[in-house]
Amino acid sequence: MKIIVIGSGIVGASAAYHLVKNNTEVIMIDKDHHGAATSAGAGIVCPWISSVDDDDWYRIAKGGAQYYPELISQLKNDNEENVGYKKVGAICLGANSEELERIEKEVGTKQIDAPELGDIERLSTEKARQLFPPLKEGREAVFVSGAARVDGRLLRDAMKRAAQKHGAKLLNGEVALIHEGDKITGVKINDEKIYADTVLITAGAWSPELLAPIGIELKVEPQRGQIAHINLPNTDTSNWPVVLPGSSHYMLAFDDSRVVAGATRETGTGFNYRTTVGGVNEVITEALNVAPGLAEGTIQEVRIGFRPMGPDILPILGRLDCLKGIVLATGLGASGLTMGPYVGKLAASILKDEEVGLDLVAYNPNRAIK
Ligand code: FAD
């Protein structure tokens, strides 16, 4: 079986990796667009604390978090250990003690089916500041030890390299689909035609552009996110937890004295790849409100990414009724680093007509086309 994977962000890289390890000929193609979401994503993996209240979302996001340790160990067997994944825990700040009690209770209920979320602990303001020193004084928190952070760029590149080690081919360039009758038979890239049994579309926010020439409107839109990377010289941030202040903003840290403060959620920007004054102001103001100790840090970089937002909160995953030879895996929105590796694995199973072990009805891609 020969599969072409269009787009090697977190979803495409994972699908390619799982396919090639399952005796499949794989060609990955990527254009390296500015604003690929995986290159900008913060990297929080903590589906148990979320403002999203949807069982189908939770099921696949929970599966995503649960799958990480297994994936990391598979990659280790392929000598790919530099992926920036670590279970550092998450500090969840509440407005008052009633809210913290509610969070504790909600996460406690989820713990029964998701023991991987680890321990739940109420933290005094002093303890919270020991774990994340820039935090403002006076806020108690709930700590969830199983939350993790991942460097999307490192993980994606590790999966791409591992896929190549197993025999996948990687091509650079922009592709268009070859459409014959009611079937996609391959792709055109740089004036060359490549045929395959099935084409997997994991092109993130750009996925609609591939289907539009065939007259299919895919309801996926880019949502711009601006996110600041702050350097704290001579500070060991490697074990700092994720901070969830209860809004759409958050902070997390990586090994290289770096705190990431995110992010804007800008709908209607199209692919306008720009750092805006308002965007930077928003993320920095929100971060300093919660963690004034970051004020002396250096703004190292502001990353911009386009989240692939589908018609609802759920991923778009599976085959289309109106077109053969194609599988879609996109629309992961704001949770793609959490569920992306798992969704890639599921897409690989769909392509191989294997049992996936999860009810996929809610993610049916036919709901997202016109
Ligand atoms: P992408 O990473 O965008 O990859 C698509 C790829 O397809 C690109 O490389 C592009 O160049 C390529 N492509 C497109 N069209 C073509 C074509 N015609 N030919 C060839 N190649 C093509 N998720 C979390 O779980 N936790 C977080 O903390 C988190 N934080 C985020 C913060 C920000 C600021 C942003 C922007 C996103 C965040 N996300 C987070 C969401 C997550 O990053 C995305 O959902 C995920 O990365 C989407 O991955 P993808 O593979 O679908 O798309």
Image: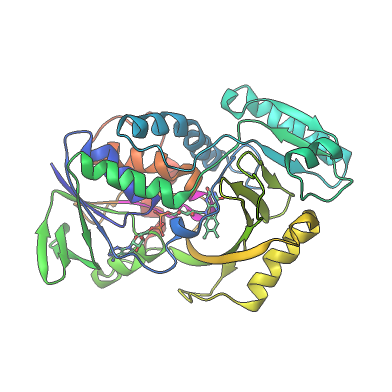
Snapshot quadrant of residue 191: bottom left
Q: Residue at x 76, y 28 (%)?
A: 121
Q: How are the colours assigned in the image? A: rainbow
Q: Magenta region: which residues? A: 328-336
Residue 19 screen position, x and y as percent: 24, 39
Q: Residue at x 28, y 37 (%)?
A: 18
User: Does 341 sit left or right of 197 as displayed?
Assistant: right
- Does the rendering let one see residue 301? yes
Query: Which of the image's four quarters has the N terminus?
Result: top left
Query: In the displayed image of the protein, which residue is found farthest to the front?
Result: 234
Q: Residue at x 55, y 53 (%)?
A: 42
User: Does 111 sit left or right of 121 as displayed?
Assistant: left
Which of the pair 130/49 is nearer the observer?
130
Snapshot quadrant of residue 265: bottom right
Is 276 located above or below residue 40 in the figure? below
Is 1 contained in the magenta span? no
Which of the pair 75/322 is nearer the observer?
75
Residue 278 screen position, x and y as percent: 67, 75
Residue 71 screen position, x and y as percent: 39, 33
User: Does 115 sit left or right of 144 as displayed?
Assistant: left
- Does the rendering let one see residue 310? no
Task: Give the quadrant of ligand 1.
Answer: bottom left
